Each structure stands twice: as C-alpha cells, then as structure tokens.
Image (tube, rainbow, N blue to C red):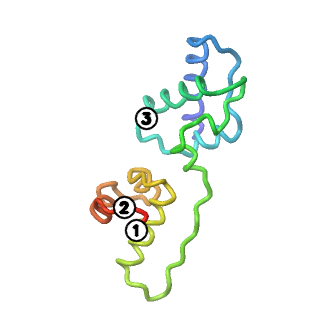
C-alpha cells in the first residue's frame, strides 16, 4: 500500500516535470484506488497509469476519474450474491465467478486476483462463453 503510493508519487513528480506540469498530487480517492489495486503489470503499469492521469488530469489534483476503469474497479463496492443452502458446488462456483466477472467488466485476470485463483482457472471454467450469460 504505502510503498506503491511512494513509488506513484515519485513517478508523478518525474512525469509532471517532464511534461512541464508542476505541483501535481493525487486526490484521496485516487490514492485509495492506487493503493488498493493489485498492479499485475508492476512498475511499468504504474508508470503508464500515472502518465495517463497527468495527461488527462485538469488542475493540480489528479482524481480517481483520471485513472483507467480497471483501477476504479479495485475500490468499487462489491455487489453481494446469494448462494442458497444446498446449491451444488459447481453452480455456486459458477455463480461466484460470473458475478465477479460482471463486477470487473469481464476482465478475467482481475476477477482471478479478486477470487484468489489463477486466471487460467477462470479461463478453464468459463471458457470462451460470455460472462453475461
């Protein structure tokens, strides 16, 4: 969390200086999104996200809206689903995976991270089927 924020702020200073923008900082909501997101692309992804925010952002405060939608999903309240007692495990698992895919906008890698499983597991269980079915 805080390590990511320190790195993001360092990148922000570098990018702002390179692009001739000064005194930029992240809003509290942007900070929450940055520290909550899993960063599967590591520092390179973080650099791209920060640079995009600097280019798109207006004013000196970079908002959550200046970040890509995948970053927003990390802090979006999760919807709840009901699993009736006695539902077969395969059906319950399918329902959970589909609800998570819907929550992530169909992003299987992000859904896998949220569920704590390998993305190949989601690919295998859902396959080429559309998450909205």
Q: Quadrant of residue 82?
A: bottom right
Q: CA distance from mark 3 to mark 1?
A: 32 Å
Of badges 2 and 3, the one in the foreground is 2
Q: Position of residue 99 (x, y in %)?
A: 48, 66
Asked if residue 74 is positioned above or below residue 64 in the image, the reply reads below
Question: What residue is disc 2 on?
Answer: 130
Quick one: 107 or 28, which is closer to the camera?
107
Answer few, some or many: residues within 10 Å of disc 2's Cα (few below 14, many 20 plus, some between 14 and 19): few
Q: Are marks 3 and 1 in contact (CB under 8 Å)?
A: no
Q: Secondary structure at mark 2?
A: loop
Q: Are marks 1 and 2 in contact (CB under 8 Å)?
A: yes
Question: Which numbered dot is residue 133?
Answer: 1
Which residue is at 58% across, 65% downward? 79
Q: Considering only order in the chain, which callout, 1 or 3, is on the residue closer to the N terminus? A: 3
Q: CA distance from mark 1 to mark 2?
A: 6 Å
Q: Secondary structure at mark 3?
A: helix
Q: Quadrant of residue 126?
A: bottom left
Q: Quadrant of residue 11?
A: top right
Q: CA distance from mark 2 to mark 3?
A: 28 Å
Asked if residue 110 is positioned above or below residue 121 in the image, the reply reads above
Q: Position of residue 127 (x, y in %)?
A: 28, 61
Question: What residue is disc 3 on?
Answer: 42
Quadrant occupied by the N terminus: top right
Q: Position of residue 93 (x, y in %)?
A: 39, 72
Total numbered badges shown on the rendered structure: 3
């Amino acid at each position: 969390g805080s390590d990511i924020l320190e790195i993001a702020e360092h990148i922000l200073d570098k990018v702002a200086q390179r692009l001739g923008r000064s005194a930029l900082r992240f809003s509290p909501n942007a900070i929450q999104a940055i520290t909550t997101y899993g960063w599967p692309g590591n520092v390179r992804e973080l650099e791209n996200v920060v640079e995009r925010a600097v280019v798109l952002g207006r004013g000196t405060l970079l908002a959550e809206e200046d970040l890509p939608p995948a970053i927003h999903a990390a802090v979006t309240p999760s919807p709840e689903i009901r699993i009736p007692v006695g539902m077969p495990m395969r059906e319950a698992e399918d329902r959970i995976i589909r609800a998570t895919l819907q929550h992530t906008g169909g992003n299987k890698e992000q859904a896998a991270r949220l569920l704590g499983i390998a993305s190949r597991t989601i690919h295998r269980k859902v396959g080429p089927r559309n998450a909205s079915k």
